[in-house]
Amino acid sequence: MALVWIAGPLSGTLVQPYVGMLSDNCRISWGKRKPFMLVGAAATIVSLMILAWTRDIVRGFLGLFGADPESNGVKVTTIVVAVVWVYILDFAINTVQAAIRAFIVDCCPAHQQESANAMASRLTGIGNIFGYVAGYINLPSVMWWLGDTQFKDLCAIASVALAATVLMSCLLIKERDPRLEAPKATKQSAGVFAFFVTLLASIKKLPPQIKKVCVVQFCAWVGFFPMLFYTSSFIGEIYVQPYLEENPHMTPKEVDELYERATRVGTFALLIFSITSLLTNIFLPFLIAPTYDSQPIGEAPGEGPAASFRDYGDEKKGWLEYLVIPGFTLRRAWLLSQLLFMGSMLCTVIVRTVPAATVLVGLVGITWALTLWAPWAIISAEISRKDAFIRQKRRAMQQAAAAGSSSETRPGFDGYSSEEDHKLDGSEDEAGQAGVILGIHNMAIAAPQIFATIGSSIIFKIFQKPRGTPGDHSIAIVMAIGGFSVGASAWFIHLIKDEAPENSADDIASDAEQGGVPTPGSPVESRDRRSVEQVARPSLERSSTVVRSRVSLDRARLIRSKSYSGMDYA
């Protein structure tokens, strides 16, 4: 059982960063992320199907050699095979998750990341509700052709849903052709040692905002893990307490029936949790003040689709614009949700009725909605902004090369000299690591679950009573201690900045020299000094003026409102 419990955190810690690194370096014509989405989805479906039919497969295979299906050897073999496929399933799920999250970052500009991640959070909530409803229904009596057990039917439904949604995303959404980007350095290796070296270097180079988000997630998930895994058991323990106190001498059969009813009560509480989370995902975004200006990076004021909306004026604002609470940013909503979680978890040690406990679980759904939205939106926006700046540097180099390229310079990739291409690699590697950065973020989520598992086991060893004994509050103690950890994460959210960092022309020029963009005075481009100053520098200065967070808050709200109706999604 311990091997199964550790599979999720272990795969999340190692698989997602590795898949992110591979997808960042992918140069297939149909996209960086789509190959990993398709392969991960296919592996997930195969794993689910084999896991659902493991007993039948093992019995049928060993039966060919005359093994008794009810023998102890067949049962042990079934367990071993199931554990192996649980690990394969976890690895496959992390592959498709890593690719999908990076897919959102790549396909949406910085000013749409909040909206895109809010939509992803909504759809996750809808999927959770469908999953709980499907689990509550007696599926074999309704969909007998899918399988003769509840687990088989659930795996079949999940496989069909995953295949349909991944195929739809791959067919309807177009990625940028990665072949048009600078080629990755040939010295990079895909070996295990190189992976850890690259991972360590990427952690050291994380932008400050993303580092803070990872620290928040590390603290928060120490508290989220008990809530996610023990909520139904917590509700169930409260449900059985009065029955155990009235009749402490129940037979084992009566105890089993009592806990079976308690499990259904706990499942209902999880359904309330999912509904609360979904409602929060639907309505809260309309109250949030956007953090980033709606003007896409690289467009001057008055240019691009955003400018057309700005010219409408106040009389064209929709009623949704007046729902926005000034100053109520995504970061502040996230902070308040963490405090709400801490308060709810601390109350678990004093709650003694099922309705009150269900209310606490429902309130935690608000926190869960922000957890699925806020950190991803903040990180995605940072990655997208950095990537946009790097692409603009490349455009500036193209302008410089077109205006005054020397006859001594040999054209290279996308019109650059081969020397310029090599110099740009360092800069683009830093910006194009969406997969690795999101993988590191997932490490900050998965690693604390290992510590939470160990800590929970110690607490259960000390406080847990035998099954069927009244007065067992060990789960409430674990959840309350987790609440303190989430409270610490709220402090680190306080340290995250609301405003997007301003990028002055000097900062961009400094970054350009480090990444190989020709700036005045750089040794590589000294012969082209005049053309670079006249062409590249003004373009960079113009873009730096554009990228001010919240230069026009009204325009940002109006654009974001349009994006909810589907106009601004690309």
Image (cartoon, rainbow, N blue to C red):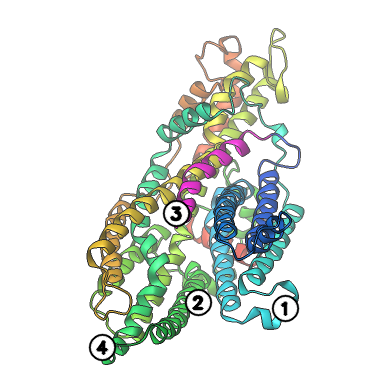
Q: Amino acid at mark 1?
A: Trp
Q: Position of residue 525 (x, y in %)?
A: 57, 13
Circle on res. 245: 4
Residue to which mark 1 is pinned: 144
Q: Position of residue 329 (x, y in %)?
A: 41, 60
What residue span does the magenta drawing correspond to? Answer: 1-26
Residue at 36 percent across and 56 percent down: it is: 453
Label 1 and label 2: CA atoms lie apart by: 28 Å
The numbered mark, 1 or 2, whose residue comes first in the sequence reads 1
Residue to which mark 3 is pinned: 375
Say if the magenta span includes residue 410. Answer: no
Label 2 and label 3: CA atoms lie apart by: 21 Å
Circle on res. 275: 2
Q: Amino acid at mark 3?
A: Pro
Quarter of the image with the N terminus in it: bottom left
Q: Position of residue 476 (x, y in %)?
A: 28, 71
**Badge 1 vs badge 2, beta-carbon distance below 8 Å:** no
Question: Can residue 238 be seen from the camera position used here?
Answer: yes
Secondary structure category for the residue under label 1: helix
Left or right relative to 106: residue 258: left
| Crowdedness near tag 2: few (<14), some (14–19) or many (≥20) residues, C-alpha within 10 Å | some
Q: Position of residue 82 (x, y in %)?
A: 58, 56
**Badge 4 vs badge 1, beta-carbon distance below 8 Å:** no
438 to 122, vertically: above or below: above
Q: Amino acid at mark 2?
A: Ile
Q: Nearer the viewer, residue 535 or 218?
A: 218
Label 2 and label 4: CA atoms lie apart by: 33 Å
